[in-house]
Amino acid sequence: METNEFFLFLLVILLTARLFAELAVRLKAPSVIGELLAGVVLGPSLLGWIEPFEAIKLMAEIGIILLLFEVGLQTDPKQLMKAGSKSLVVALVGFCLPLLLGFSLAYWVFGFSLLVSLFIGGTLTATSIGITVRVLTDLKRQNSKEGQIILGAAVLDDILGVVLLALLYEFSVGGGVTLGNAGKVILFVAMFFLLAPVSAKLMSVFIKRINSATEIPGLIPTTIVSLVLFFAWLAHTMGAPGLLGGFAAGLALSRRFFLPFGIGLRADESFAERIEKEMDSIVYLFTPIFFVVVGLSLNLREIDWSSPFIWSFSVALLVAAIVGKLVGPCFIREAWPSRWIIGTAMVPRGEVGLIFAELGRESNILSNDIYAGMIIVIAITTLFSPFAMKELYRRFSHRLQSTE
Amino acid sequence: METNEFFLFLLVILLTARLFAELAVRLKAPSVIGELLAGVVLGPSLLGWIEPFEAIKLMAEIGIILLLFEVGLQTDPKQLMKAGSKSLVVALVGFCLPLLLGFSLAYWVFGFSLLVSLFIGGTLTATSIGITVRVLTDLKRQNSKEGQIILGAAVLDDILGVVLLALLYEFSVGGGVTLGNAGKVILFVAMFFLLAPVSAKLMSVFIKRINSATEIPGLIPTTIVSLVLFFAWLAHTMGAPGLLGGFAAGLALSRRFFLPFGIGLRADESFAERIEKEMDSIVYLFTPIFFVVVGLSLNLREIDWSSPFIWSFSVALLVAAIVGKLVGPCFIREAWPSRWIIGTAMVPRGEVGLIFAELGRESNILSNDIYAGMIIVIAITTLFSPFAMKELYRRFSHRLQSTE
């Protein structure tokens, strides 16, 4: 790709994202919807001006891990732990139920094979941590009680999703799906989550030391981005979702994260604040690229809207996708508005669902028709739950605990 | 390229650049040398870990236009105009003399064809605006009198270089090289430099208005980066070097740039300051990538060091390359230390020389041997003149006017 063409694409993506986000907010919609729609409009679905190309996809990936980093940075690990058991219930039910419902529909109602049905169920388990977190941040509810439950559940859901994807992958290439394999992945992920924050924290202490000694400006942007990239890389290498590496790094550098025995405790708050300040504009620059690329990747033109199969299939799956996520919060002790909000926040499938569906198509497990049906489910859950969340917050805000 | 591999490469590039820059500064060398060497070490010249790949090259291009943007932002257009005639003399002599010397050596001494000799001379005309500007910024001399002369001369040299490149290109593909063609390019470039700052300024006034009305954070990073990309794209489309678009945009948004009739004059300073502050970390993140990529692109392994031709050819050209740039400042009324510094600042060929040499090789005009010789000249001028500049400043700083 020529530099000049790249510059043009990138600036069109950034400006269209901004324009649509501003319009969305004027129409009382979440800004992330504007960015997703910008991608749908620019991409193959509508105008066909920009296909998702390699460099922009890679920059989008930087965007999502930086967003998760920033959310981690603003998270209180103690709060997250406190919400832990509730998050676990929400994540487990929201994982198993859609898998079960999706699989049953596909296997018994539509009569697909075992593997195809497992893939369809698997796609329904996804929760788009990116969309969810972005809506919470936009509404400034990421530190609220229900926000912490959602965050924890989204993280756990992502881990479960990766484990399932790994198992399905083994299954589809004919390898032995053993509990041992699953156990290995879970063990690695657990190890990652124990070790990553501690080592990230130690590295940040090191960065702070260099920062007071160096004469060359720009230490924080380059080293903190490197740190985030490193933990994303490490997470992926250990079998966990890469973006959770970004989250772990953010958590470790947050103002309220302290190492055991209080190492590096003093005067850390101001450094955490400084990191936040210097990273802000970088995060703001990269994040919209991610959501536009999700929109670009949703090719709604591939769908044959006249096919009765696609209609019945996608409507059935859509119900399974929504119900499957709304039931989980009923099992935890929270007021009803909180339960509704938590359930709704888990609904968008976004980029995680797309990854599942793409993998299924690429390995010839999902036919084009089934793929198209999944795309409809992903598009609708992704585009409408942010609206629903915003509306729920508007209606019930007086009955929710204020932030923190 | 896989996301995970990209993350690893990017973080290795960022961290190695930082490490080598810190080492360079400890050894009293300019930090940009560290970044260039990081590229040489990581790249095909030494370890061969990272080849320059598309996504990183595109991010490097963002880096260089953002650096030029920031330099423009810190430049006083009036000072630049005042230095104008001196800059013109330095640029013209520093363009014609290396062209003449390089051509003569190639044509009469080494007996190459007309086209090959023209390409060799053309490569010697380049001045790496990136390296020059970076060294000035590191030494905090970009606003000094000699700094303004250097800046203006580097900009003019870049324009002349693009005109020559366009002519050589036409010449090599057999199109008619007419004065009309050259005139057209110069006309477009002049138009660009008249219109760009005014329209960039108007756009920034518009951005400022939206900024006070929007609820979504992150307006400045996305829109200012888009603005810079737009002017880089426009410059390139009109036949000027893209990075000068970044410079023009920065100039327009600088604190001291006022539109005719004082439009948008009030309270602008604080907005310019805010832009500088919010753009800082983005510039710091992308800039080192550019210099590392220059280092990655210098493949010193391709050089057959045992060939006597390469030694004689590159030594002869090196003398021409250095002398050709040092003579220019002798024609302007400045003290000797200033003259030396200005001349030395024009010596590094850097990325501009590489573009010339690459084009010559790709179009089969330059043989591998000649290309290798040019690479030696580019590497030596690029790596050593920053040292020389720093040393000259150290020695003569008491005899130079203090900044502004």
Image (tube, coloured by chain):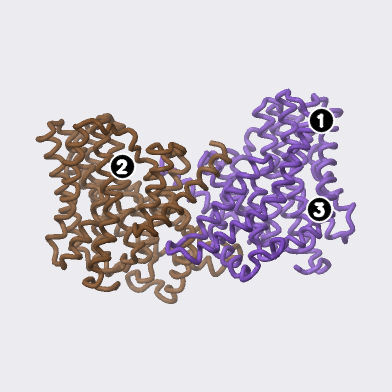
Chain colours: A brown, B purple
User: Residue B337: x and y, percent?
Assistant: 84, 60
Q: CA distance from mark 1 to mark 2?
A: 58 Å
- The residue sitting at 89% across, 58% down in the picture is B333
Determine which of the numbered discs, if any, sits on residue B117 in the image.
none
State the image coordinates of residue A104 (x, y, percent, origin top left). Answer: 11, 39
The residue singled out by tag 3 in the image is B87
**Would residue A342 be found to the left or right of residue B361 on screen?**
left
**Which amino acid, mark 3?**
Ser
Q: Mark 2 is on which residue type? A: Leu
Quarter location, residue B399: bottom right
- Residue B90 higher or lower than B362, as above or below: below
Please indicate whether residue B285 sits to the left or right of residue A72 in the image: right
The 10 Å Cα crowd at callout 3, few under 14, some 14 to 19, many 20 or more, is many
For the image, the number of numbered tags is: 3
| B248 or A112: nearer the viewer | B248
> Which residue is label 2 attached to?
A354
Give the Cα distance between marks 3 and 1: 28 Å
Find numbered disc 2 in the image and state the secondary structure of the residue it sits on.
Answer: helix
Closer to viewer: mark 3 or mark 1 = 3
Q: Which residue is mark 1?
A: B106
The residue located at (15%, 33%) in the rendering is: A114
> Identity of the amino acid at label 1?
Ala
